[in-house]
Structures are given as C-alpha cells and as structure tokens.
Amino acid sequence: KKIILSGIKPSGALTLGSYIGAIKNWVELSETYDCYYMMADLHAVTVRQEPAALRRRTLEQIAQYIACGLDPEKNVIFIQSQVPAHAELAWVLNCYTMFGELSRMTQFKDKSAKNADNINAGLFTYPVLMAADILVYQADLVPVGEDQKQHVELTRDIAGRFNGIYGDVFKLPEPFIPKVGARIMSLQEPANKMSKSETDNGGCICLLDKPEDVMRAFKRAVTDSETEIRYDVKAKPGVSNLLQIYAVATGKTIPDAEAEFSGKGYGVFKQAVGEAVVELLRPVREEAEHLLADKAYLEKVYTEGAEKAARTASKTLRKVYKKVGFVQKS
Ligand code: TYM
C-alpha cells in the first residue's frame, strides 16, 4: 500500500485555498492509501505565535480535518510536536542539506523579505524539517498545493544524497498537486495567493466563516473591467480564480462553468460562486463545531494518532541513526 503524508501549519485558520489545494485530495487519497495527516505546529513557530491561540487553532484544525471527511479510524491524524522523530531526523538531515540549497527556496526568500525583523534559523531550515516529516514515514505521495512543490523536490534531493552515501534508506516521494485549484488566489488581489495572513480584508475565505461573510467576500471579489466570464489566467486572473473555485465547489469542469455563465453578468456569477462555496462549507462548519464541543474525543484522536505515527517514524529514525554511526541504545 502506498503511503501518504501531508500537513498544514496551524498558524491561522484553515482557508479555502488549503482545502482546495490540499485537503480535498487528502480525503480522496484516504480511501485507498495509508495516510498520515498532521498539524504542523513545529513549522508554525518559525513565525511568532500567541501560545493560547496556537493551541486553540491546532485543536480547531483537527476538528476541521475530521469534518472535511478524514476518518480518524482510517487515517493517522496527529500533532507534529507530539512525535519527536520529526525533529530528531530533521537534525540529521540538516547535516546533509546545503546552505546554498536552502538559500534558493522561494518561500524563504518571500518570507524573509516580508518578515525582515525575524529571519530566524528555523525559517531557513524549515524545508529540512518538512523533508524529515515526509521521509520519516517513507511516504510515496505528498498531496500539496503548487507553492509546496519546491520543498518536495528538495526533499527528494536530500533523500537521494543520503541514499547515495548510505544505500537505500529513504523512499523518494512525489508531490501530488491538483489539476484545478493548485493555487487559489486572493479574492481582493488576484495576483497573490489566498493566504491565512490575509483574513481581515475579505481576500481570504476560512472554512469556519459564516455564510453571510462568505457571500459578502464573493460579492466584493475583484474581477476586471470587461464583462465576459472566460477562463484566462493571464488576462483575467480574478474571473479565472472564481471559475476554478466554482468548478471545484460544484464538481463541474471549467468549460462547463464558462458555458453556464455565458452571457451573464459578473454580479450573477459572483453570487453563484458564493452560494456554491457556502454549500461546500456548510457541512464542514457544522460538523467541526459539533466535534469541538467534544474535547475528550479530539484528545483521543490525537493521542492515538501520535502513538501510531511514532511507531512508524521510529523505525526510519533507528535505521538512520545506525547508518550514520550512532551507538544503538541497548
Ligand atoms: P501551509 O500550511 O502553508 O498550507 C497548507 C497546504 O495548503 C496548500 N495551500 C494552497 N493551495 C492552493 N491555493 C492556496 N491559496 C493555498 N494555500 C495553501 C499548501 O500548498 C499546502 O499543501 N510547509 C507546509 C506544511 C508542511 C507540510 C509538511 C506539507 C509541513 N510539513 C510535510 C506536506 C508535507 C505549509 O506551510 O503549508
């Protein structure tokens, strides 16, 4: 059976971007594969977090994973910081990753430009921890959005380098990126990715947003000065983004969506996209609220998840420690 690993940082609420780019595929893959889905809290602290908020969002994120359709009986759902092997393997992999490689990571370059007063070492070595997350489970596939592709490629490079020295220790993972929706854009600035750092201005939709807020954000979504509803990412980024969201939310193809709105105005179109997203999110929000009321159940899910994850992860870690020459614990 193939192995899947992926995760999301609880550094903000889950967004429609991460749902379409990642979680939707997780749910589909979860039917046939052995899946590990985590809350990447170790990655979240590369940026300052308010401790109580981080804790709350981590639990909310677990509830939302389940509410999106990930069955904890069939998937290993866990919190990254509760499985020490991630950080332990990351240390070793740090010693097999080059300064130059990390300097070329576009996400590091973007984030350090935006966050010039806190360019910490964790932000720099972030992709090495991500490589450890993936390699420690010997994952075959890593379902992520477009922006994480470079990190998965670096993971392959690090694994290949390590295998080149010590023999076949790590499986080389492949990124698994959706054909439609790999990069959902901000509703306010369609040149930028929809991101959790942008929840206040209506550019970002979160999974737990109220229907009226979702409708308001879509009605205000930036389009262009034409009137035609046509998929053309370069010339019409706002409209194309809405077409992608609509297609994913309704299960239709983009050409079908174009045909459906041919001759109709942007107002009608934006209303329809908003309604489709409200319907997509309604069951998720209701189920998540229900789950959040049951703290004992969530605790059981992440505790069992961490135990299962640690069992798998420790096998790889033990092998790595042996290969590099650490003395085995008796
Ligand atoms: P994060 O938390 O930034 O995003 C979580 C996932 O959602 C995808 N995504 C999007 N997809 C399409 N359009 C968008 N606007 C959008 N915004 C986010 C991301 O591509 C990602 O798949 N480093 C990772 C977390 C991580 C991880 C891992 C992922 C840590 N360890 C191991 C995979 C495997 C991150 O910051 O994702």
Image (cartoon, rainbow, N blue to C red):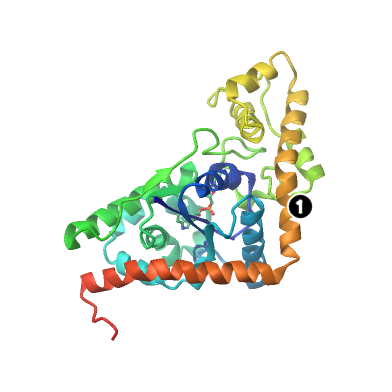
The reply to whether residue 188 is in sight is: yes
Residue 38 spot, x, y in % from top left: 52, 60
- Which of 277/94 is in front? 277
Q: Give left or right: position of 194 versus 1.
A: right
Q: Secondary structure at mark 1?
A: helix
Q: How many marks?
A: 1
Q: Is mark 1 within 8 Å of ligand 1?
A: no
322 is higher (above) or lower (below) than 210: below
Type of amino acid at the residue the image marks with label 1: Glu
Residue 158 spot, x, y in % from top left: 29, 56
Q: Which of the image's four quarters has the C terminus? A: bottom left
Residue 291 spot, x, y in % from top left: 72, 61
- Which of 203/93 is in front? 93
Residue at 49% across, 72% down:
307
Q: Give left or right: position of 118 versus 229.
A: left
Residue at the farthest right position: 212
17 is higher (above) or lower (below) than 75: above
Residue 213 spot, x, y in % from top left: 78, 44
Residue at the farthest top position: 263
Q: Which residue is mark 1?
A: 286
Mark 1 neighbour density, 10 Å: few (under 14) some (14–19) many (20 or more): few
Q: Give left or right: position of 205 versus 10.
A: right
Residue at 72% across, 63% down:
292
Q: Residue 92 sits in which quadrant? A: bottom left
Q: Residue 87 sits in which quadrant? A: bottom left
The reply to whether residue 81 is in sight is: no
270 is higher (above) or lower (below) than 8: above
- Which of 203/297 is in front? 297
